[in-house]
Amino acid sequence: MRKAMQLAFVAIVTCFIVAAPAMAQEGGAPAPAAPVVKSFGVGLGAGIGAGLSVLGAGIGIGLIGSRTVESVARQPEVAGTVQGLMLISAALIEGLAFFGVIVGFLIMILF
């Protein structure tokens, strides 16, 4: 363990020594600034929209799961068919939730 710690320390120090000349160079154009949200309301709205999208997907998948277990308990012979349909439905709901989150973040970044 001690040998590994010494090796890690030597590797970190070597990285700092090698990187120092590269970081000391001057010139070149300054780095572009990160996009800034112009309004607090846009960020808040995008966050609430993304959160509601995920919340709705969680509720939907929970309902699908409970109904699937209930239907398999009533008719065990159709378990394979019901499970396949449940997985397809859950995947579609997850895709919709992912779309909602992406749209929320794009609104936050672009506006």
Image (cartoon, rainbow, N blue to C red):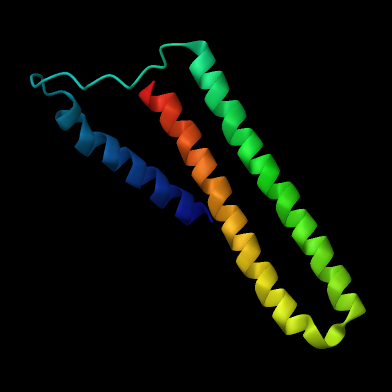
* Front residue of this view, candidates 8 and 25: 25
Which residue sits furthest right? 74
Q: Residue at x 28, y 41 (%)?
A: 15
State the quadrant of the N terminus. Answer: bottom right
Q: Answer with left or right where residue 69 lies relative to residue 12.
A: right
Q: What residue lies at 88% left-to-right and 82% top-to-bottom?
A: 75
Q: Quadrant of residue 74?
A: bottom right
Determine whether 27 is above or below 80 in the image: above
Q: Residue sitting at 88 percent across and 69 percent down?
A: 70
Query: At which x and y percent is residue 94?
Result: 59, 54
- Determine which quarter of the picture holds residue 87: bottom right
Q: Nearer the viewer, residue 32 or 54?
A: 54
Q: Residue furthest left?
A: 27
**Residue at 59% of width from left, 61% of height from top?**
91
**Residue 60 location in percent, x, y?**
72, 52
Q: Say whether residue 3 is left or right of residue 61.
A: left
Most extreme residue toward the bottom, as rendered?
77
Residue 103, x across and y down, in percent: 46, 36
| Rendered location of residue 45, percent (x, y) | 56, 22
Q: Is residue 85 above or below residue 28?
A: below
Q: How many marks?
A: 0
The residue nearer to you, when weighing 79 against 109, is 79
The quadrant of the picture occupied by the C terminus is top left
